[in-house]
Image (spheres, grey):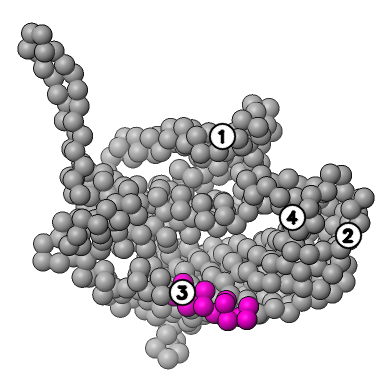
Amino acid sequence: MTQIIGGIKVLALVSILFIFFSPTLHAKSFGERPVYGIRENPNQGFNETIGQVGFIYGLTWIMFPLFQPSTFLDDGSTGRYRDNFGRLVWDKDEPFWNWMVHPYSGSQLYLYYRANGHTPWSAIGLSFISQALFEFTVEIYTEPASYQDNYITTVWGAILGHALENFSLKLLNGPSQVSRLFGHLLNPSSLLWFYSGKVHFMPILDHRPGQEKLAGQLILEF
Amino acid sequence: MNIFIISLLLLTNVYAHIHDKEERHQFALLGGLSIGSDWSRYSAGGQGHYPFPGFMTRISYARSSKSSWQLAMSSYASMGHFSGINFRTRDIIFENTRGRYRDLKIGPSIQYRFQEHELFSLRPYLGVGPIWGQRTFKFSRADYDASQIENPPDRRNFKTNYEMRGAQLIFGLNQEDIGDKTYPLFFESTFTWLESRRVLTIDASNFRKTNILSRSRSTRGMQNLSLYLSVGLRFL
């Protein structure tokens, strides 16, 4: 019985992989007039890239305590930060963290750099740098960096990110708003300007006497 | 501290290398599904032979698409059920165990690609390298002497974890690039041989936090031979 269930799981995984990586689906997603597509810019400036890495690094300092408040407050300390600095171990975390959360985080890093116009290999390199900065300088507030996290976040994350990118592009170029919504949910970085200019931010400044205002208008087009 | 500095230097170099030389150098990202068989022997008694499902991934680098040699970093993940194994951690022996295990192995390898040979229109390659891994057994039942553990958790919430090291031997066949919108296939068989170095007992009652109850050296506490048969795609 266990073997049958195992076989069903493998079959389901193969089916999912087929849908995600199917070249036919990928080709169809770019119809006669594709709306969403990646605009690669391999000649990005050093400052732009540093800005993107810096943005993600800053975000990890905010996201880490927000998503794991009890771990951060109960287990974290500056003394532990000092002790963990430079250490590299095999962590013993549950598969939920190591086999699901880390690949998903890696995939979103990959998609973020792709959405900013980086080539796939540049996106993988930058994902590696971003996750290593998190592992070696942020997460050590509570636990040492781990061997498998460095590999899994980057490599498993890149494969998952590549699949999500293909699948989300198909959904984003689909006929219905529902499919576009799911496309954006799978690949939130598709909302960034590099994809299609579907996000607009417009500052509003009114100087008329008695009606002075400073505001902003954010338009997300699905 | 040293590891941190070395890592940062490596990261900087890797990125600069990828960014500047992407056109000339050949990187590859592969992933696939595996089935396999696993033979393990435990010093505390018992041995296991289990078929398993799993998956493997690899990132590799060659100086050019014509190079015969390439460097790779691979991972092999597998999972399954176990029963009837005895485990010896620092002072505790778990007997009549049953539960689930998961296994992760990661290691670098150097691979030789037979560029001039073809087997069923596929190019063979051979690789060898060290490998490190850990195997975690989560018990659904186990007999043990609870008095030896300070604040023992519920008996179903124990894990035993082995840290291992060993070697891997790879033989594979891969398809040439056949166009932009298809992913080349590869077939591979990998043998891994590992011996445990450390064994840990872990309280698994809180999945958010890792509470290590004991750790000790375990040279040859577990010896493991695995065969992975994988089929997969080269994604990039």
- Measured Cα–Cα span from mark 2 to mark 4: 13 Å
Q: In which quarter of the image is the C terminus of chain B?
A: bottom left
Residue at screen point 42% across, 62% down: A159
Image-based side of A203 in relation to A51, left or right? left
Look at mark 4 in the image and give the residue it sits on. B157
Mark linked to residue A168: none
The answer for which chain carries disc 1 is A
Q: Is residue A162 above or below residue A8?
A: above
Q: Three-letter amino acid code at disc 3?
A: Ala
| Front residue of A2 and A79 | A2
**Residue B116 on the magenta segment:** no
Q: Mark 2 points at which residue?
A: B144
- Amino acid found under the numbered disc labelled 1: Pro
Q: For residue A68, what is the image quadrant?
A: top right
The secondary structure type at the circle numbered 3 is helix
Return the x and y of residue B56 as percentages of the image width and height: 53, 69
- Identify the chain of the residue marked 4, using the numbered disc in the image: B
Crowding at dot 4, Cα within 10 Å, few <14 / some 14-19 / many 20+, comes out as some
Q: Which of B38/B167 is in front?
A: B38
In the rendering, at what x and y percent does residue A58 appear? 43, 32
Residue located beneath label 3 in the image:
A12
Residue A205, position in %: x, y? 13, 19
Pinpoint the chain carrying mark 2: B
Residue assigned mark 1: A69
How much space separates mark 4 and mark 1, taking CA atoms? 24 Å
Q: What element carries label 2?
A: loop
Mark 3, residues whose alpha carbon is within 10 Å: few (<14), some, or many (≥20)? few
Residue A132 drawn above or below residue B156: above
